[in-house]
Image: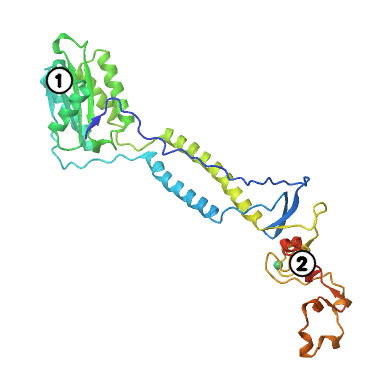
Amino acid sequence: MPHSSGGGSFSGGSHGSFSSSSSTSSTPIYHTYRPGTHRYVYYHRYRPHYYFSEKQAEASSKYAIPFMIVFALFWIGVSIPFWFMTVNHPKRLSMNYDSNIEISDCLDIMSDSEEAQLREELAEFQDLTGITPSVLTIPNSEWKSDYKSLERYAFTYYVKRYDDEKHWLIVYAGDGASGYEDWNWEGMQGDDTDNVLTTAITDKFNRVMHNELRAGYTVKEAISDSFEEINPVVMETSVNWLLVVFLIFHGGFALVVWSIVFWSCIKNRNRGESYPCPTNEATPVEVTCNSCGGVYVQGIHHACPHCGVRLIPPQMPYGQAQMPYGQAQMPYGQAQMPYGQAKVQGNVVKPEYTPVNKQAGVNPDLF
Ligand SMILES: [Zn+2]
């Protein structure tokens, strides 16, 4: 369907606003000790990190980070076409249609030589663009009797007259010889011309046309000068800087919000794998793993939290671990002792496996 070229409106714009709610954990997390809190440790990049909280931080959903990545890819995917829209490469239309240039001067306001001259200028535009311009002049009475606006009239005329979307019809309506006090004009462009007849081009055309008609130029002069104005630039590649600036701010804002949410997801994921520390006040004893060089807190792991190598308990006094050789070799029958008797063996007394130790993943064998 053809549409008006006489005052188009910019129809690009936003593709939806970005909104996201920051994920915050329900339990507050502190960097220093507060009454009622406990020290927790988590590991990131082979280093221990501490935080204080009333309870262990909950890990964010394991889907949070993949979701954020998919969301970002989706966002970028949606934005790409808008970036392409910032640059317009006009392409000449193929002339596989009835491309007769028509000048129908029903008002009889152009002389034959003027008409011939105008036809040449319209042909020049057609050569450049592949768009066929047509000029129609009519008395006001012709459209005012049956149509609410000249735009409606021009639309109906276009659809009835041309079966393609490659014409640019310019309709001038006036009262002929009685002067130009009451005049209207309207441009109607086929859909296929949009790539060439951009708003920037038609605005340029309309400005000259309108100003010259107001200044009392003849219709022929006004139309000729308007085409002369756009012909040199109509096929030039243009950049929509307003859209570029908009996209930069739009994307920049989204990037900032996304980064904040993504960073909090990463933090939550790390904190989720955290351990209660043996002490709240003093800085815990940090030990470097012999296998991987990672640093961990002493007294809460039986295996290196970084590489998983089993840790040798350093605290046990040598003598107590060594049982007399003879006692270890028990007759088979004696090994099956009632439960109570098994609790105390030699000098080694096992500590109770308390709920606190259990929570901390403490292996009582290590003490
Ligand atoms: Zn290790």
Observer-nearest residue: 150 or 361? Answer: 361
Q: Kindly tell me whether mark 2's CB lies below 8 Å from ligand 1.
A: no
Q: Position of residue 60 (x, y in %)?
A: 59, 52
Q: Is residue 205 left or right of residue 314?
A: left
Above or below, comparing residue 190 to residue 54 in the picture: above
How many residues crowd mark 1 within 10 Å: few (<14), some (14–19), many (20+)?
A: few
Residue 353: image tag: 2
Residue 150 image offset from top left, x and y in percent: 20, 21
* Residue located at (33% from left, 36% from top): 236
Q: Amino acid at mark 2?
A: Tyr
* Residue drawn at x 33%, y 28% as measured from the top left: 9
Q: Amino acid at mark 1?
A: Asp
Count of picture labels: 2
Q: Position of residue 159 (x, y in %)?
A: 16, 32
Residue drawn at the location 14% of the way across and 13% of the way down: 176
Ligand 1: give its quadrant: bottom right
Which of the two labelled residues, at mark 2 and mark 1, occupies the earlier sequence position? Answer: 1
The extreme bottom residue here reads 331
Element type where label 1 sits in the image: loop
Say above or below: 286 vs 252.
below
Q: Which residue position is annotated with label 1?
A: 146
Alpha-carbon span between mark 2 and mark 1: 96 Å
Asked if the residue at tag 1 contacts the one at tag 2, i.e. Cβ–Cβ closer than 8 Å, the answer is no
Q: Quadrant of residue 120?
A: top left
Tell me: residue 308, above or below residue 67.
below
How are the residues colored? Answer: rainbow
SS state under label 2: loop
Badge nearest the viewer, 2 or 1: 2
